[in-house]
Image (cartoon, rainbow, N blue to C red):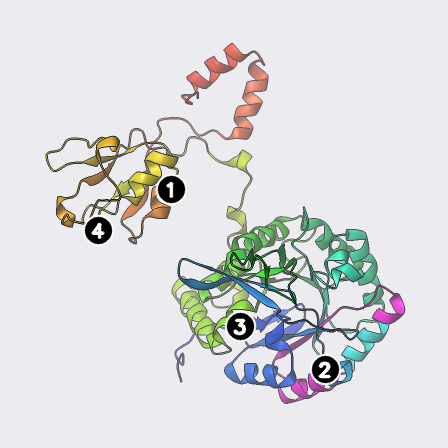
Amino acid sequence: MKGWWRMADLSINFAGIRSPNPFWLASAPPSNSGMQVHRAFEAGWGGAVWKTIGAPVLNVSNRYGAWHYGGQKMLAINNVELISDRPLETNLREIAEVKRAWPDRAVVVSAMVESKPEIWHDIIRRIQDTGADGIELNYGCPHGMSERGMGSAVGQVPEYCEQITRWVMEVAKIPVIVKLTPNISDIVMPARAAVAAGANAVSLINTLNSIIGVDLDTLEITPNIGGKGGHGGYAGPAVKPIALNMLAALGRDSIVGGSKMPISGMGGISTWRDAAEFLLLGAGSLQLCTAVMHYGFRIVEDLCDGLSNWMDEKGFAKISHVVGGSLNRVSDFNNFDLSFRAVARIDQQKCIRCNLCYVACNDTAHQCIDLIAKDGSVVQPQSYDIQANGKDEAVNSRPSVHVREVDCVGCRLCFNVCPVEDCIRMIEEPSGRPPVTWGQLSLSQREVTEDWEKMKQYREKMGIEIH
């Protein structure tokens, strides 16, 4: 069996919910039925959050739009699908059947109903009767249900979030997870509301409000529902940076963060590397949807093997040893050392003379990369045809690219546009200035004077360039 040498323990205990690994199906189409969840567990998934159940709905066709870019399919997906359109009794029966068949897997049920205490009490009791391990309260859906006063309409108002969660906790006997919406100015506030209401955990992020695009031939919105379209939920690899930022915000919060409130992370997780990043920023369990919709249940094998191998390499014996490991490195701008200096260096042996770094630096950054001809002279931009380069010339006859390190500000744009791995590296160089943060600088400026001339003298004394 692949991975038989695995040493790291991938099992988790998330807010009292146990599973053999941290990878759960998110509440979405992949967890829509007992048959699907059963197949996912056969493939090796540690848990599943059942597609949201509640009052009956009618879904539409078409439901999904996707953003493709640079030849890569589904960098993001957009959906206008609502909660489960299957009969409530059918869902409840299948939840019970799956849990009986898979006692070692996490079966969590997502729920969303009308904002009345008696209706929430009823659905929570019925879910508990199935033997499910936990409940996830869907306060995140940004379309369809939100227009009916549910989903993100709740998650965007901390008072509603707290009120409904309190109703749930009045009857809940199994762990309750509050799923947060990213469509809000400060994700911390509804999370604090969940804490105040007594929830056992939170999960984030749900999908972002979006319109995926317009068909330039028909002028219709994508996806097209009978000639009309609108906003839907945006998910997939493209939302990962947003998810990581919000995850870190909760992890660092004095009320939600640390060990105070377990956090289930989701939003663009596609590989074991993504998973490790979410764990390091505070997630205790991991939920996936878009990657599963793209590649199927089979990806869990690579997720488990990759994460386990990385943990072995780094010396992490348990998932809990990884969780939050990078949170202490997240800081505010005021605490950054303004004296830190890095410069770009180009490995001429790896450089393919594509000149993307040159164009990016000279057109849009700080003009510190030169084209050097074979005779050592600097090629003037106006005399060098970037578009023609490479069409008729051999690679070794093209001008080479060199960084003027004295002028390099370390913006890292060249590093980011370079298509060759490790061709450009960012190297730390002594700045010759004492460490100073913006917070310290601002304080010193106030202590000196608000007069511009004296402030200028102070900055010159500190060796800080004035623009």
The residue pinned by badge 3 equals 293
SS under mark 4: loop
Per the model, the C-alpha gap separating discs 3 and 4 is 37 Å
Q: Earlier in the sequence, mark 3 or mark 2?
A: 2
For the residues bearing labels 4 and 2, Cβ distance under 8 angstroms: no
Residue type indicated by callout 3: Met
Per the model, the C-alpha gap separating discs 2 and 1 is 50 Å
Q: In the rendering, at what x and y percent does residue 176 appear?
A: 73, 68
SS under mark 2: helix
**Quadrant for the N terminus in the image:** bottom left
Q: Is residue 194 visible?
A: no
Of 299 and 6, nearer the camera is 299
Q: Which residues are magenta?
A: 92-120
Q: Residue at x 61, y 80 (%)?
A: 105
Residue type indicated by callout 4: Lys
Q: In the rendering, at what x and y percent does residue 101 appear?
A: 63, 89
Q: Residues within 10 Å of mark 3 (few under 14, many from 20)?
A: some
Question: Is the residue 20 above or below the residue 243 in the image?
Answer: below
Of 76 and 341, nearer the camera is 76
For the residues bearing labels 1 and 4, Cβ distance under 8 angstroms: no
Residue type indicated by callout 1: Leu
Residue lying farthest left?
375
Q: Is residue 152 visible?
A: yes
Q: Residues within 10 Å of mark 4 (few under 14, many from 20)?
A: few
Residue type indicated by callout 2: Asn
- Nearest to the eye among marks 3 and 1: give it: 3
Q: Earlier in the sequence, mark 2 or mark 1?
A: 2
Which of the labelled discs sits on residue 413, or is there none? Answer: 1
The residue pinned by badge 2 equals 91
For the residues bearing labels 3 and 2, Cβ distance under 8 angstroms: no
Based on the picture, tell me whether residue 202 belongs to the magenta stretch: no
Per the model, the C-alpha gap separating discs 1 and 4 is 18 Å
